[in-house]
Image: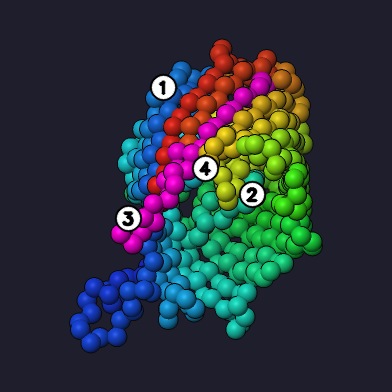
Amino acid sequence: MSLTVFRALRLVTLPISALISATVLAQPGDSVPEAENFRHNHKLTAQVGFGPEDTVVGADEAFFTALRYQPTLRWFWPDSDWPTWEVFTRTWFDYQSSQNQTALLEDNRTQVDGTSAELREFYVKRHRLFGHVGWSLNIGRQNYTSDYGIWWDDSLESVRLIFNDDSREAFIALGQRFHTYNTSTGSLEANQEDRLYLFGQYRYRWTGQHWAGLRAMQEVDYGDAEIGSPATTATRVGIYLNGSTDPLQDQVWDYRLDTAVLSGSAEQADGTDDSVSGWAVIAEGGTQFEEVSGRPRLGLRLGITDTASSPFDGFYLNDMQSTRVLNEDRPATGLSGSYDRLNFSNLLFYGVIAELEPARRTHWESGLFQVNCRDDRGLLPMGPVLEGRSQQCRDSDVGQVLDTRLTYNVYPFVYGTRTFNWQWVLSATFYRAGPAIDTDKDDFQISLSTELVF
C-alpha cells in the first residue's frame, strides 16, 4: 500500500513541482509561464461555539473553536482565458479545539483535536477533450458534492470525465482513497481502505428552470472484513428532480426531490455474507413571495428511509456521503439545521422552514423538525450517544429540533488588486429529546462563524 501511495503522490505532484521550479529558478530570457497563467485565492474561516462536547447527544456542554486557512492555486496553459491544461491545488491549515463543529465546515472524516494540515485537492484538468468545449477530464484528488450530501460530499483520488452544455450536465468517476494527506492522521481508517468507487450522474433541463436526473454509485470493498467494519459491496441508484417557476413572478415555487435505492452484500469478520438493501427519499418544496417586504419563503422538508434494526441493515451512508445541505447561494447546513446529528438510517423526519431577508445582504432562516424512528425498536437514527447508552430506539419519538440561523454578507470591498467577500453566520439550535433516545437531558448549541474570501 505504501508503494501505491508513493506512486500516486509522485504522479500528481511531479507536474506541480515542475511548474514551481520553472517559475522560481528561471533566468531572464527563459521561456516560463506568464504571471497571468496563475490564479490564487484564499479563504479564512473562524468559528466559536458552545454545545455538547464532541457532538455527542446528551453530553455536557463545552466551548469549542475552529480556525481554517484554505489557499487554492490554479495554473493554466497556454493561458487562463482559453486553457488547454489546468493544475489545481487546495490546502487546509486547521485548528480544532475539539470534535465539535457545525455543518458549515467541510469535514475530512478524520478530524482530530489540535493543529493539522491537509492537501485537500490536487488534480490536473484537460479542457476541451475530444476537441469539444463541453468535455473535460480531471485526474487527481478532487472534491465531489451534491445538493444533499447523501450521494457524495468528500474528496477522492479519482479520474473524472465531465460533460456540460446549456441543457445537460454529466460526469462519471472512478476512484479510491490511498492516503489521508493529513499531517495528524497519516493512515486511513479500516472503513476507508481498499474501497473502490464507481459513480456518476446525468441531468437534463427539460424546460425553463426544471431539471431531471439520474445518479448511481457502485462501492466495492475488496479488503478483509473486520469486527464492526464489514467488507461491503453495494450499488446505489436514484432519480432526482429540482426546479422553480419563473423568478420574475410575484410568487415563486421551488422543489427538490432526491431518491436512492441500495442493494448489495456485507461480508462479516466471521466469513458470513449478509445481504444489504434499503432506500431513502428527501423531498423539499416551498414558495417565496417576491413582492412582499423581506421576500419571505415558506417551505417543507421530508426525509424517510426504510427500517433498520442494526448497522448495514437497511439504507446507510458510506464514507463518501453526509447529511449536509449544500446550496450555492447559502452557507452549508445540515438536513435538520446547524446541530445535525442524523444518521440517516431507520429515519423519518419532517419539518417546516421559514426564510426572510430583513435587510440588504442579510438572510434569516429557521426550521422546526420532528425526528422519528421508522421501527420503534430498530437502530437509532440520531447520534452518537454517550458511551454505554443504547443505540436502539425505545419509542418512535426521537424528539424535536428547533434551528435558527442569521447570515450577514459584508459589502464586498477592494484592497489592492483583490476583492474581499466577508460573511458572518450566527446559529442556534435547541434539541428536545424524545422517549426514543437514551439520554438524561435536552441539548442546545450556539455558534458564531465568519468567513473571508479573497
Could you say which disc has been placed on residue 62 in the image?
1
Q: Is residue 187 magenta?
A: no
Specify the quadrant that holds the C terminus. Answer: bottom left
Q: Main secondary structure of the magenta part?
A: strand
Q: Residue furthest left?
A: 27
Residue 225: in sight, yes or no? no
Q: CA distance from mark 4 to mark 2?
A: 23 Å
Tell me: 248 left or right of 101.
right
Residue at x-position 37% and y-position 70%: 38
Residue 135: in sight, yes or no? yes
Q: Identify the element where label 2 is drawn.
A: loop
Q: Which residue is mark 3?
A: 415
Residue 14 lies, in percent from the top left, at 36, 72
Tell me: 263 left or right of 101.
right
Mark 1 residue type: Ala
- Dot 1, how many residues are within 10 Å of its Cα: few (below 14), some (14-19), or many (20+)? some
Q: CA distance from mark 3 to mark 1?
A: 38 Å
- Quarter holding residue 42: bottom left
Is the residue under label 2 in contact with that under label 4 (CB below 8 Å)?
Answer: no
Q: Which residue is mark 4?
A: 361
- Name which of mark 4 and mark 2 comes first in the sequence: 2
Q: CA distance from mark 4 to mark 1?
A: 31 Å
Q: Nearer the viewer, mark 3 or mark 2?
A: 3
Q: Which residue is mark 2?
A: 147
Of residues 316 and 188, the one nearer the viewer is 316
Mark 3 residue type: Tyr
Q: Identify the element where label 3 is drawn.
A: strand
Could you say which disc has been placed on residue 277 in the image?
none
Vertical order, 287 against 328 (above or below) = above
